[in-house]
Amino acid sequence: MNKPRIKIFLVDDHPLVREWLTNLIHQQPDLVVCGESADAPQALQAIAATNPDVAVVDISLKSGSGIELIKNLKALQPGVAVIVLSMHDERLYAERALRAGARGYVMKSETAKKVIMAIRQVLAGKLFMSESLTAIFAEKFVDGRLPASGSLVEELSDRELETFHLLGKGCETREVAEKMNVSMKTVQAHCAHIKEKLKLTNAAELLREAVRWQENHPTG
């Protein structure tokens, strides 16, 4: 009797990425893609229905946030192991993702072999991250803090960082609220906190800084 295949669910807002991942995973005789989604709310429902072993999640999604999705999955579907596959800089996002409940973090610039390796390692109950990230975390463990990168952006909360990222991509406040599934008032509160933490005096400075940061951290 054949052993049932390990089920993988894909959450990415780019159809080509989902197609590439599906082809990659289906080359493995014991793995199968059981579903896919482009946004967080839909993914949460579909994962509850399909009950996968692993969810491969991007941070930037069509609607909602990958980080918030990971937090929700940890609370509602704790049996699903989450791996982040993203273009976002691991130095800024990996610790946030792992703290939210992810078991692995893979940059999209890595090889296909690394993606399969991450799935295997996470299924074995281990964490997966790059060698450079492992070295950073080891230094944090010894020193009690991450090596300083000189960026105040690291002080932002997950939701503030998401707001900052969307503003930098040219989203209006209303659009930011819709993408994050929050009220305009909440977005305005996030903007106020960002200005305070980044030592910015007004909305124009905030927008200029967000655009500049996005240009230096392109994520598509």
Image: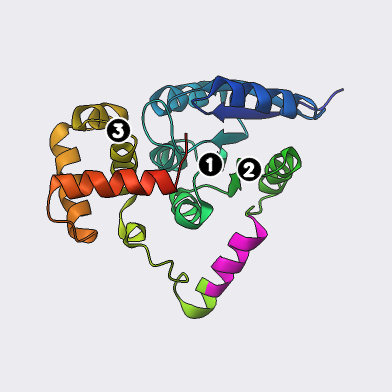
Do residues under tags 2 and 3 come within 8 Å of each other at their CB atoms? Answer: no
Instruction: Estimate the spatial distance between the alpha carbons at disc 1 and disc 2, rounded to whole Å.
Output: 7 Å
Residue 29 falls inside the magenta stretch: no
Q: Which mark is residue 170?
A: 3
The secondary structure making up most of the magenta span is: helix
| 39 relative position to 32: left or right | left
Q: Which mark is residue 87?
A: 1
The secondary structure type at the circle numbered 1 is loop
* Mark 1 or mark 2, earlier in chain: 1
Q: Which mark is residue 109?
A: 2
Q: Position of residue 149 (x, y in %)?
A: 43, 66
Q: Position of residue 128 (x, y in %)?
A: 64, 52
Extreme residue in the bottom direction: 143
Q: Nearer the viewer, residue 61 or 5?
A: 61
Q: Position of residue 122 (x, y in %)?
A: 66, 47
Dot 2 amino acid type: Ser
Q: Foreground mark, 1 or 3?
A: 3
- Position of residue 64 relative to residue 210, above or below, is above
Residue 133 falls inside the magenta stretch: yes
Residue at image x 60%, y 22%? 16
Residue 52 occupies which quadrant of the picture?
Answer: top right
Instruction: Estimate the spatial distance between the alpha carbons at disc 2 and disc 3, rounded to whole Å.
Output: 25 Å
**Number of numbered callouts drawn:** 3
The secondary structure type at the circle numbered 2 is loop
The magenta-colored residue range is 130-139
Do residues under tags 1 and 2 come within 8 Å of each other at their CB atoms? Answer: yes
